[in-house]
Image (cartoon, grey):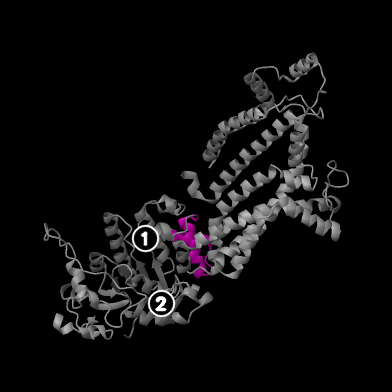
Amino acid sequence: MTGSILEIRDLRVAFTGAAKPVRAVDGVDLALVPGEVVALLGESGSGKSVTLRSILRLHPENKTRIEGSIVAAGIDVMALSGAALADFRGKTVSMIFQEPMLALDPVYTLGAQITEAIRKHESGVSADAARKRALGLFERVRIPSPERRLDSYPHELSGGMRQRAMIALALACNPKVLLADEPTTALDATVQVQILLLLRELQRELDLAMIFVTHDIGVGVEVADRIAVMYAGRIVEIGAVRDVIRAPRHPYTIGLLSTRAQGGRLSGKRLPTITGSPPDLASLPPGCAFAPRCSSATSACLEAAPAAVELGHGHAVRCIHTAAVA
Amino acid sequence: MIFYASKRILFTLPIMLGVTIVCFALVHLAPGDPLVSVLPPDASQVIKEQMMALYGFDRPYHEQFLRWLWRALQGDIGTSIRTGRPVSTEISKAVGNTLMLAALATAIGFLLGTLFGFVAGYFRDTWVDKAASALSVFGVSVPHYWLGMVLVIIFAATLGWLPPTGAGPGGSEDWKWNWVHVQYLILPAVTMSVIPMGIIARTVRALVAEILSQEFVVGLRAKGLSELGVFGHVVKNAAPTALAVMGIQLGYLLGGSILIETVFAWPGTGLLLNDAIFQRDLPLLQGTILVLAMFFVVLNLVVDVMQTILDPRIQRA
């Protein structure tokens, strides 16, 4: 795709710490244009967070094998190391974590953590100027009495406020791409909505490209332009939100959508589930990883990993039965 | 901050009272007559009773305790039976000597311990870690009086670089901060430092490994900090616990290692305690234990307050 701010090509990540390498990500292609939001949807262990962290190269290098190409704002991420990698992180691409209580340093004030990031990336900014910017950021993410909160420690804030502070930290150096790793999962339902709206609003104002990892379809629909469904380290279906939600074509996506509790419409009945469990990533079958759980699977499914089938409007599915399922 | 500190000081008062009771009781629970070592075996009953009355040993225990406590509060913790000098004089001299030794030993132990601990924690499961861990295990498990003797054999007897025992040409009197005196401090301090070194190294290693596995370290890298920058954060996170361990170790060493001070004939509290026990000098024994226990309480207080300065979560918890 031309004009993309972030382009991932054939990303493969394997963790080599165990006896058998765990293939957490197995050939992911993804491209974002500026200002676009993609929701990366999948269950635990589907490789969505691993994909996200690979973009910042946050995996321990001695225990991870990472292949493919990642280009963000013209920077070849895979070629970076040392100081250049540190300069890239937080400045070109920054990240919001699932649990801000764990992702913020407990013994530094929030203000100190934000000014530290600003002064790291922009030499010559005085401590005063950095603090003023941090204050501006706190106002922007609508933290009440921001002046006082800058001097607070993470444990002194509520979960929602902490996540706002985390967002302020991520936006401190005007990144072009924002990675959000389940930023609302650890929050109360009411606070979730507020954070989601705030993120969406800031993303539009700043024209940020954003990858939003979630396992909550509702959240993905709310926040994203496109949805990418991951299963066993691969994107099995990707497309505009309405295409994927209204006309899902991969059996896994179809199954996923049918498991949602549709308000009260299914009251009195058992929730539908996808039978079986996700495959062991250390010994993936050669064919389609979903085949063992798939009702329309045939022997052909077990032979080779299905290639992506383009259905138009950027809607692509990795299933050899696409035509039949539709 | 000040509120927390004063609250913490108030908390120590009952602890101190408990300490005095235990100190007092401990000595009186010991079998035998407190005067047995000063009176000749054939002393008459009259003289015995006179002496008992003189030292107040004939009163009921609670009265003895209150009198002792009242005097202790005024700084008078009795007179040594053996030397006839005030216990406080004996102790203050010994405490000064032990303090010198303990402070130096803790400083050496803390520096080496944190160094080994950080290296081992950062390079976990590599040979560097194993070497550092082996060294710290050696530190906590080697018998220190034995290590002291070995060091004396090597550096004093064989090489002749350092004096083997004592506290300088003038004995325990007349200490000066010059090489003539300081050289006497080196061997005992190095021997003593091995204990805190081992314990601090093991604590710091576990701490650093634990901190490095936390999510916020990923967060720090994600916002673009260099490894050096991350290291700074790790140090500040590890500092409160490392300091607490160091404080407790200093407390132990202030008690004076009886064995090490005996091996090196270092005139500190350990040697004093040793002498008081063998000579059944009850007031001296009582006073020494009391002063050392108080030291411990105060030191814990200082460590606690310092921790809140470094780690804001403790204060409000």
Q: Quadrant of residue A191?
A: bottom left
- What number is the disc on residue A215? none
Would you say residue A207 is visible in this rendering? Answer: no
Q: Inspect this view and state whether residue B54 appears.
A: yes
Circle 1 marks a residue in which chain? A
| Label 1 CA crowd tier, 10 Å (few <14, some 14–19, many 20+) | some
Q: Quadrant of the C terminus of chain A?
A: bottom left
Read off the magenta span: A107-134
In the image, is residue A121 part of the stretch drawn in magenta? yes
Residue where numbered disc 1 is placed:
A140
Check the image and name the residue furthest to the front: B42
Residue A182's x, y, as percent? 33, 64
Q: Which mark is residue A14?
A: 2
- Hey, which quadrant is residue A7 in on the image? bottom left
Q: Is mark 2 on a helix, strand or loop?
A: strand
Residue B35 image point, x, y percent:
76, 24
Q: Is mark 1 on a helix, strand or loop?
A: helix
